[in-house]
Amino acid sequence: MVTFKLNGKTVQGEEGQYILQVAEKYGIKIPTLCHHKALEPAGMCRLCTVELFDGRRSRFVTSCNYPIWEGMEISTDSEAVHQGRKLIVELLLARCPNVPVINELAAKYDITEPRFKKENKDCILCGLCTRMCERMGNSVISLTGRGVEMKVDTPFHLQSDICLACGACASVCPTGHITLEKIRQDISKHAVKPIPSEYEMGLKGRKPVYVPYAQAVPNTPAIDRSVCVYFKTGGCKVCTEFCGVDAIDHTMEDEIVELNVGSIILTPGFEPFDPSAFDSYGYANHPNVMTAMEFERILSASGPTMGHLVKMSDHKEPKKIAWFQCVGSRDLNRCDNSYCSSVCCMYAVKEAIIAKEHSGDDLDCAIFYMDMRTHGKDFERYYNTAQNAGVRFVRTRVHSIDPVQGNADLLSVRYATESGELVNEEFDVIVLSVGLQTPPELIELADSLGIELTQGNFCKTESFEPVATSRKGIYIAGAFQGPKDIPQSVVDASAAASAAGETLTPARNTLTKVREEIPETNVINERPRIGVFVCRCGINIAGVVNVPEVAEYAGNLPFVEYASDNLYSCSQDTQEVITQIIRQKNLNRVVVAACTPRTHEPLFQETLINAGLNKYLFEMCNIRNHDSWVHKNNPDLATKKAKDLVRMAVSKVGLMEPLEEADLEVNQTAMILGGGISGMSAARSLARQGYETHIVEQSSQLGGQALNLFHTAKGEDVQEKLRSLTDEIEKDEKIHVHLETTLADVDGFVGSFESTLSSNGNDETLKYGVAVLATGATPLEPLEYCYGKDSRIITSLELDRKFIDKDESLKDMGCAVFIQCVGSREPERPYCSRVCCTHSVENALELKHLNPEMNVYILYRDIRTYGEREYLYKEAREAGVIFVRYSVENKPDVALEDGKILVTVTDHVLGLPLEIEAELLTLASAIVPNKVDDVAQFFKVPINDDGFFVEKHAKLGPSEFATDGVFLCGLAHYPKPIDEAVGQGRAAASRAVTLLARKVIQTSGAVADTNPAICSACGVCVSICPYSAPSFIDPEARFFPGKAQINPVLCKGCGLCVASCRSGAIRLKGFDNDQIFAQIYAMAEAV
Amino acid sequence: MKIQSVKDLENISQMYSKKLYTPDGIKVNIGMASCGIAAGAEASYSKALEKFPGDNGVRICQTGCIGFCELEPLVEILETGKPRVIYKNITEDKILDAIEDYQQAHFKKKWILGQMRDPRCVLEDIPNPLAKVEPFEGIPFLEDIPFYSKQVKIALRNCGYIDPDSIEEYIVKGGYAAFIKALHEMDAAKIIKVVKESGLRGRGGGGFPAGIKWATCAKHDGDRYIICNADEGDPGAYMDRSILEGDPHSVLEGMLIAAVAIGSGQGYMYVRNEYPLAVKRLITAIRQAESCGLLGDNIAGTGFSFHIKISTGAGAFVCGESTALMASLEGNVGRPRAKYVHTVEKGFRESPSNLNNVETYANVPPILLKGAKWYAGMGTEHSKGTKVFSLVGKIKNTGLVEVPMGISLKEIVSDIGGGVPKKKQFKAVQTGGPSGGCIPGRFMNISVDYQKLAEVGSIMGSGGMIVMDQDTCMVDVARYFMDFLKEESCGQCNPCREGITQVLNILTDICAGNGKEGDIELLEELGSMIQKFSLCGLGTSAPNPVLTTILYFRDEYESHIRDKKCSAGVCKNLFHYEIDEEACTGCTLCAKRCPQEAITGEKKEPHTLEQDKCIKCGICYDACKFDAIAIR
């Protein structure tokens, strides 16, 4: 260590360090134009000159390259230094009067106009580019010429062959003298092109060192070897200079790690279809023809245009956008993907609506489609919203896209309308709704794993084992199983976890390590002794905020015993240091001023625990996201703000008190309400994982609606499979089936529910830790199409029954008609029942098998045979099933005349009425959820307008409720086919196991608490809480009867009740009034 | 033959001293340094050689710079038993006559510079070969001519006395004895001690004590290098060139001694490529030294090895700066770097490197042979020994002089240099090359040493000395040097590149009559910043000409700016010529010479000058013998 004086202050640096480095460490800014951390200092700009007193005399040295020595005295901003620097800046301003960085510098020195003869150059000859090029291992450019002739150039001013066009020179150029354009024209013989960002779909460049995307896990940068200069020249390694913790190792190689595992889950996903090959769409050539994935990026606030909806050709706002559906899906002519990609209709609708939100209602959005497939939960509603919002839906398939003559930005589209009219329309942007497909490498992987694929190259699964591959122990989730959307993928994922968990049950908890318990110090009644740790976050914070100054400031705040700054507070070594300091300094409150508590608070709380402190004696303030990032152009104010934030945190933390986290024992028993396919699947999974499970079924038989189903879409015999499932359930000792039983009452909460089961007048009490609601649905009994008036007019399930019963009469019929959307997609039931299209197509095919001569008609609105169910549709058409489309305004007419069933429908091609005499009319009636109002009440879970349960999160929490300990699956969630019901049953089990696997669960300490003495028992808190945490104290209770109380177990600490309590009777621990006000008062000091 | 000992040197000495001092027949030594050649010595030599090709009584030989460059070609003619006579201005047409003149003993006074009393150099302890010789009558003794009388030749000890292409003649003059002594009798510490005690300071300009430099370099581990800076770049200075052309072995010997003292095996000679003759003679000298076993492996059987390579510079002034020189030597662009780590620690190829210039090395052998005390006995407290100056400019006796430190400026300029010609007024002397300062007449009595020169704002530099008379405009002088420096600044650092450019812009404006109030202060401000903030010596000393001229001749600047007058008649926009009617005799000389026919007048009548036609070429001014052309 070398000790010397810096501006009168005694400082220390390491032997061999330069003055500038030490000054930087102490937060002293020295101006420089030619210094770069990764480059050897050159001392060229001379701006960093400082005054050195060596004991005898003063002289001027450049701080960037003057090595420190013991006892020297440095003055970084003496009058002489300041005057000299000012003159240098003035000289540079004369040289480059139009360079922003010089203008800014001049403004700082109060120079408005140079006193010298002006030139108009843009290079300040700082040499950063040439030194950087040298560092890249190339030295393509150098400073050539002498004196005033000096310039940055290649040898002999020839375009270089060895230049990699890496752009490093341009990236360090402070004045804009070297640009990519200059590299292209003057420096390199090679093409200058950005590295396309995979995440931004190539719409933007990225660096060779990059985090794939903002939410990537792990969120650490990686080096792309294929473009990293080090792997090309052996030079560069600049990144290592910037990494404060030496984390970069260029010698690392890929390693093969062998793991011994009990099961494998495949979640490799899909690739979006590449439409480049569709030459008639011109995707490869026209910037305004883009894929939906690219369009997603443009809509995204973090995308290449920062969420600004513009054309890629000229960055102007588009007026008209078209979406082309089924690009790379349902197509055998121009690609091999004849399946439906399931998700594109919905995403196109969504993109159209968001585009309108971005650009305003004037934006014309048209979606060109074949069938609108919005079969997901609440999707049909969304489709209706889009129509109402003015999104045009045009049923047609467009052949080609042509640029408009004379205006290359415009795209011309020629198409036929439904009425057969030819239309020419021009659009600014055309979005290709590309489909999902399995990439070739996955097909290879499947081959090497020995798992079977389907015709569409998706993983082959069975309906009753939807997440099991053909190879035992290998499971599957997500789009590799078939094209699907997010909720379905999440369901699959949980189901796969559950399936794997079933196999691995014996191994559960065998690798768990028990953490050493550190006794908690009692700090109650102690005077606060606060420690403040200010984080530099490398340069993330310290690059803007003067961190040492903030730390010094914090050290002088009341009750602060210790304050320091760290390079990376979250690094493991710093954590240990903080632990030691808490112990040594006997701290009882801690403030960390760093980044976001969202990601890092638990980490620091852990540190407190390790130091024997209650983890709630902690406060974090975000001087990165809230300060250095947003105020990076104003370092002085940012430093001031950091001080304000730290002062606020300090004043709050002094009032923090240790909070307790309640332990809650979990009753490791599950109750499943509903004995259908999904309920049984859930039960089987829970039992296989070792948990006692009760199935409560109101009917006298297990099986639910599946009892009426003939075949699955994949052709499996439902009854056979159902029987084996039921058998297994009945034989399983851990599963207790309660038939003809209903739920009379539910009490308790997560971990300890208690219910009254009522069976034929007998009540029984059941105690359990978690509940799965699988209450199912029933087919709608149609009120139209003469249903009930003729035995030949039946519902789909009734037809299934005929198949199950092998009804001979089916064979002899000459004509059968199916009518779709009976009761679905109607104003009173504005949802798609999802399964009916596939079901009818399948049954139509079955009829064709029975009698190929039979005329089979399907009258439909949109055929929604999503995913690989599309093959059935194709097969049906090939088999001669006649599909006639009708519109909801012009529904088919069914008349019974002379014992004949006459179905009249307007043929959509001819536009003329078509009368069919049907010998069998099957109505694909809607699926209607069972009435579960009482159940919803018992568990305090919500039901939507259609009567289906509302899950915790439409996308990410499809199989659980917001209420802890309650899960859902099956038709009670939304109509779904058997495979999806089985999957969701498993998924619910999987989610339940996350609770059951723990014997004890901890509740948060930051929960609300009532003061019953001032509670007015108004009930606002009880009604407002989304988690049912508040309740009234028993009116018969001895103390505070009828007043509100809060169950800390259920409370999530959201503060809704606190804010709405009109008596001020509720407080939120950890965010108490005095704590918040202390913060506010501390803030007021800043104003 | 391989020289192993003092004995071997003595043998050679004996063999060759006759040739040098007592030749058979007449020996004609023609001064064949660049100065002589420029004046036509080569033609004289060829002509003489044509006439006397063999050894038929007259032998034609070459030698280096005899010193009085103004009078080149100088030819020395000698015959055993007679004094040596130096003929001046012996061009091709005169050479044969001169030889005849000597043979016939006519001794035309007009042709003769003088005769010589003692041709020995400081290192010779042989009896004076001319001691018993009868002097010629009527010929002045060289030693009595003021130009020579005040000189003490140490570095220039052999220049003009020996054939530079002959190692033997160098040895006769005591050459290599110091090296052999150092090799056999002294150890490194002892050599360094002697050099330290002698007070020898670097003659290249910095004036850093050579002994301390050697000692520091020897202290650092690594492949140490001995480098000789022969990149003499100051305009008007040619001391090093003359030494290299006249006595290359003296430099090699100095480097060899340094190599022994510092412990180096490799030396480099960085010579300007504009000195082709010096390069040629150096190459010859190195080959000779190698063949005599004085350079190479295992020298004199002691195990000591030393090699010297020559590297030629491409003519960048800044390459005289040590770090730039070393960068150039390494094959990189010759640009300086910050010297916070000294070159004696990390220099050439990141190794400890000792850099001295030609003159410094040339001083070393005499110091070693004659002792530190002898050397330190000359000069002033902090400046010991002698210094070579090249005396140029508005002075009678242009030439190369070596004087003891401490001699007054006046002695150099007036006595040795003979003062300003044409009865003009002496104005200033500029020392130290382009980054030196201009010393006005009132300081002429100061003694020439490092400190005194610094006190008056100038530097010793490498020894350039430019004398200026009343016709010199000091603003223009400053502008001239700034123009030179602008071209020669390496361009790396802002204060130097941008600062000098702007100083030059301001000076150019002033000289063009566009100067404005505040310019002088701005020049001072800039100058002061450039001195403090520049990266290398070039920048830090660059403002000297401006600052010293402002310091001493501020009125001249002011009259340029305020009155728009250049009293020296240099800045064309700021003066005009007039004919002084009273002084004009009507000789018509001016009218005849005027290229613009701007002067008219009758014979013997005062002439008139038409200002509109006058282009201020100054021909009339120079031509007029009656001072009738006046600058107004």
Image (cartoon, coloured by chain):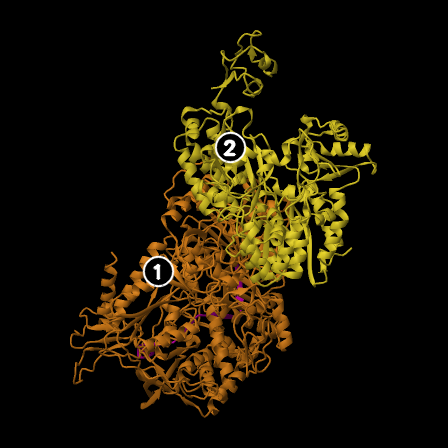
Residue on which disc 1 sits: A9
Q: Around disc 2, counting alpha carbons within 10 Å, would you say few (fewer than 14), some (14 to 19), or many (20 or more)?
A: many
* Magenta-highlighted residues: A914-938
Is A931 magenta? The answer is yes
Q: Amino acid at mark 1?
A: Lys
Q: Secondary structure at mark 1?
A: strand
**Chain B drawn colour:** yellow
Horizontal side of A566 relative to B541 (left or right) equals left
A285 with respect to B564 (left or right): right
Q: Which mark is residue B477?
A: 2
Q: Quadrant of the N terminus of chain A?
A: bottom left
Chain of the residue under label 2? B
In the image shown, does A589 or A894 lie closer to the viewer?
A589
* Residue at x-position 22% and y-position 63%: A1081
Residue A6: image x %, image y %? 38, 58
Question: What residue is drawn where x is 46% and y is 26%?
Answer: B513
Q: Position of residue B224 (x, y in %)?
A: 61, 59
The answer to which of B588 and A357 lies nearer the viewer is: B588
Chain ID for label 1?
Answer: A
Question: How many numbered markers are drawn?
Answer: 2
The orange-tinted chain is A
- Percent position of residue A897, x then y: 48, 66
Amino acid tagged 2: Val
Q: Is residue A363 above or below residue A510?
A: above
